[in-house]
Each structure stands twice: as C-alpha cells, then as structure tokens.
Image (cartoon, coloured by chain):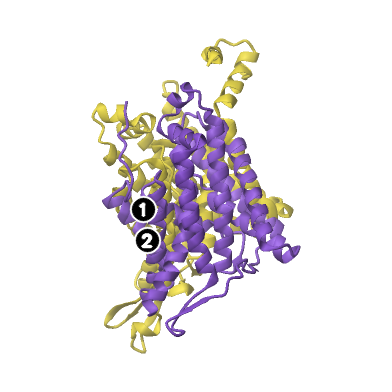
Chain colours: A yellow, B purple
Amino acid sequence: MKKMNPTTKYNMITYAVVIVAYILVAALGAAGHISSLMEGLLVPLCIYVILAVSLNLVVGILGELSLGHAGFMCVGAFAGSFFSMCTKEAMPGGLRFFLALVIGAVTAALFGILIGIPVLRLRGDYLAIVTLAFGEIIKNLMNVLYIGRDESGFHFSMKDSVALGLSPEGKTILNGPQGITGTPHDASFTIGVLLILLTLFIILNLIHSRDGRAIMAIRDNLIAAESVGIHVTRYKLMAFTLSASLAGVAGVLYAHNLSTLTALPKNFGYNMSIMILVFVVLGGIGNIRGSVISAVVLTLLPELLRGLSDYRMLIYAVVLIAMMLFNWSPKAVEFRERYSWKRLLHLPSGSGQSTGK
Amino acid sequence: MSLLSYLINGISLGSVYAIIALGYTMVYGIAKMLNFAHGDVIMVGGYVVFIMTSGMGLPPVLAVLVSMLVCTVLGMVIERVAYKPLRMAASPLAVLITAIGVSYLLQNLALLLFGANTKSFKSVVTIPPLVLAEGQLTISGETIVTIIACIVIMAGLTLFIKKTRAGQAMLAVSEDKGAAQLMGINVNGTIALTFAIGSALAAVAGVLLCSTYPSLSPYTGAMPGIKAFVAAVFGGIGSIPGAMIGGILLGIIEILGKAYISSQMADAIVFAVLIVVLLVKPTGILGKEIQEKV
C-alpha cells in the first residue's frame, strides 16, 4: 500500500465507494430497512450512474457535448430486449441476459460509429444538435417499427402489426408505439452494481492510458494535438463510441427492469439526455467519481423530498445554470481564487498571480 | 393541385422557420454561440399573445406588439444574466450548457405557470382565405400573412445591416470582436442588440406559428426551435439569405415528407436532412468556410 501511485489510489477509492455503498444497501435490505419505494429505485439508480459516467467521458474527457445519450440508451434497450424476447425459451436466464448486454452494447456502439463518423469532424455545437437529432430520429423510428416472428422467420413493417402478415402461430415482438411487452425481468441491483464497476473500470483505465491522454489533449487544444500527430477523428470516435456502447448497456438494464418497453419522450427523449447532463455538470465535468455521487444524490433527493416533485425540473434547470456560471465564468473563477481556503489560511499556492487578469 | 397546396403550406411553414432561423443565425454570427433557449422564447411570445387576446380581450395587433416587447426584454435579460459572464470562459461548452439550462428553465416555468395542458390558440389573423382555381386551391389568411411577414422581415433586416451604423457594427463584431472594439464599437451593446432583434423576431414567429397550428403548450417552441436551427445550418449558419432559403426548403421538405412518406416520420426526415447536409457540405448552402488559425 505504501508505494501505490496516486492514480491507482484514486481509482481504488472510487471502486471502494461503490462497493461500500452496495454492501450497506444490501445489508439494510436484508434487515428490511428499505421501503419498497426505495427498492424500486435501486436499479434505475444504477442505470443513471452508468449513463452519467459514460456521458462524462464525452463531455468531460473528450470535451464535446452529446445530447443524444438517451438515444443510444434507447438503441441498446430495444436491441437487448428484442434479443431476450427471441431467446426467451431457448436459453437460461443468466447467459441470455449476458448476451443481451453484449448485443445492446454492440448495437449502440455501431450507432455511435454511424453518427460519429460524419459529425465528429465538426465543431462542438454541431455535434450537440446532431446527437439531439439522432435521439429524436431513433425515438420516432421505434414508434413506427413493427417486427414479428413466425415459423418462416422475421417480418418487418413500418405500417402496423397487421401488415406484418404473420401466420396464426406468429408473434409480434416489437409492436410500434406499444413497444416490446414481456421482456424477462433479469435486471437486479447486484447486476447493476457489477455493471457500474465494469463501467468505472473501463473508463478510469481509458483515462489513465496513452489513448486517454490523447483524448484529453484533443480537448485541451485540438490544433496542438493534431500537430503532434494525434489522429483526432480516430480518438474522438473511440471515446464517443465507447460512451455510446456503455449507454447501450444502461439501456439493456433499463429494458430488463420493466415489463413493457416503449419509446416515449419521457424515457428516451431530449429531457432524459438533459437530466444526465445535469448529473455530469453537478458532479463536475471530467470528474468521474463526482458523476457517480451526483447521479445518486439527484435521483434520491427528489424521492426523499416528495413535496418538491413539481419543482424538480425547475430546480435542475437552475442548478445547471448556476453551476456553469459559478464554475466557468472568468469573474467567478477569479473570485474563488482570491477567496479560496488556501489563500485565506495563508498557505503557499500559486493562485494569487491570476488577480491581475 | 394537391401538390401545389402542399408546396404553399410548405412555404408558409418554411417562412416561420426562416424567421426563427434568423434569430439563430444572427446570434451565432455575432456571439459564436448556439442559443438553445431561442425556441423557448417563441413559446413565451405565444403565451403573451394568448393571455392578451383570449384572457384580456385586447386587439391582436396590440398583443403582438406587447409580445415582441416582452420577448425583446427577455432575450436581453437572458443574454446579460446567463451568457455574458461566460463569454470569455475557457471552455466553449460552458455557454452551450448554460443555454440548455435556460431553455429548460423557461419550459419548466411555463409548465408551472400555465400547466401542461395544450391551450387552443385563437388566430390573430383576420384576413379571409384566398380561393383560387374555382375552389380547388385555398390559401388561408395565416399563410398569406406569414409569407408577407417573412419577406418584409428579411428585406428590413438586410437594409438594417447594410445601411445603418448599428448594422455595420454588427457585421464588424461578427467579423472580428477585438478589432471592432479597437475601432470604438460597443461590442457588448451590439451583442445585446442582436439578442434583442432575434428575440423580437422569435415573438413574431411564435404568433405566426400558433396562428397556423392553433395550439400552445410549454413545449411548443422546442421542436420548431431545433428545426429552425437545422434550417440555419442548411442555409449556411451566419448568413441571412441562407436562413431564408434553408427555412423555406426545410418547410417544403417537412410538408412533402408528411404528405407522401409518413406523417409520423416527418421529424425524422427533417433531422436526416441535417445529417446529410453536414456530411456533404457542412458549411451549408450559402455558408463560408472559415479556417481556424493558430
């Protein structure tokens, strides 16, 4: 333990926080101290944490704004759920859910590449609007898509379930606006926490690798990064795709936690993407541990303060604006440096130089 | 004949997009930021007119003027409070995320004040519809007013920028903020003026939109706002004639897509246009390519 380098220490603390929280919740659950309302929140909590951490990779580490995170989640959810529906009888639950997760991740990653290739060459604002557009397209598409299966194979339609032309034994799997009904309930809190740990492991390791430093170099100065030979598009695509695939994993978890999966504005719309962005901003852009904590706090808080539920979205909006102004406005930055604890306590620090700016 | 009527509807919807897109394009050209809250200013404009006409029974013309005034003030306040402090921020993401926050704030304020229910908006246009070709083609009064308004605004704005000192100042600031300041131009004032004009136009667009499609909810502005941004990108962001061309083309594409392909997929078609444009010609139809210098 003595020679552990700071990075490893930071990572270990992050994992430990998650594991301790898990043990605590599991113990409380075993002792019967968790209300059914809270119990119902545990899996969504895991989903939000995964989404927030994976979005932080794009917003914080890559420095681009993606507003289509819910879209990738939607892709993963439908792909995973569709797979589970098809293999419901053929496979044991554990293996099926594992494969569903892989399929959800891969499908979302494919969409990430598909969207990333045209857009990542462009500047930030465009990426934001295109990812937003992508999310809306996916949501739209899921609402008009019908897929059924009978003994002769799969049938597709964009009109209605009758147009599928299924034989009497056939079954509609994806039923347009009604979505997918009857996805097996495979998700559990334990699996959710394992997936959080996996997500953290992947992202923390990426950040501290050569690739991760290349990605951060792009964020800090694109032209300088390019001139030292960093393949900008490739690294941007790498971060973007990884983030998309992790959102897909969260989607699969989401789909297997509910019996009916539909693509509504509420669950896969623009608002969902914004909510995740609020988690990331509040936790600190680029701070992975912060994302975990803020996702947990912001999910639990409105439930604990039921009376505020009407104002929840309003508070999110104000939090978003206030955090950005406080953290990024040059005047606020200067103010914080001038009155920081270190300075007030007369500790040596280099922050005093920036006052003349 | 049905194609012709679709085209006219498309031009009418496109004119609304063009007016909204102007606000985006001017702000983008000068402040170099994507004002996400622009679409929600439209919604505010709609609600102001709704309260004035349906609630207080005031004449529509007065209501529209008040609405423009309210939106102008709102636009300037948003700029002053939320965007100006971040103009020199280290990360370009900061102001973008703040803009999303403002958009979210306006939507949720409207949700708390007016409720989630869709209100039925009484059209402010009193011109009778124009019937052509022995009743086979009807052009509604709203359509006529929208198209005329779009042309008048476009011409007025072009004259304003070409002929007045304030307009020239806008051009200078969009060209080079630092140099403009050295020439004695009040950069902050010019940016505030841009937001004021853009927001006043948003109010007009809101009234026209709600008159043509007579419903109003806290989310009324969000989708047209995003589509108008698509129109601005399509025409070439930063270019005023580009916003007009992009808006009208997008309106036609949307209406034709709705009529001939699928009504549920109309939004998806519009966004697919955006992706294709960015893939083929990221600078849009009339946009200029700007090389980033070190």
Residue for badge 2: B249
Residue A346 found in image quarter: top right
The residue tagged with tag 1: helix, strand or loop? helix
Q: Is residue B13 above or below residue A319?
A: below
- On whether disc 2 and disc 1 are found on a single subunit, the reply is yes
Chain where mark 1 sits:
B
Q: Amino acid at mark 1?
A: Phe
Task: Left or right? Give the position of A16 relative to A149.
Answer: right
Residue B118 found in image quarter: bottom right
Q: Residues within 10 Å of mark 2 (few under 14, many from 20)?
A: many
The spot of residue B91 in percent (x, y) is: 46, 32
The spot of residue A279 in percent (x, y) is: 54, 44
Q: Nearer the viewer, residue B91 or A259?
A: B91
Q: Which mark is residue B234?
A: 1
* Residue drawn at point x = 26 percent, y = 82 percent: A152
Task: Left or right? Give the position of B230 relative to A272.
Answer: left
Task: Left or right? Give the position of A223 relative to B33.
Answer: left
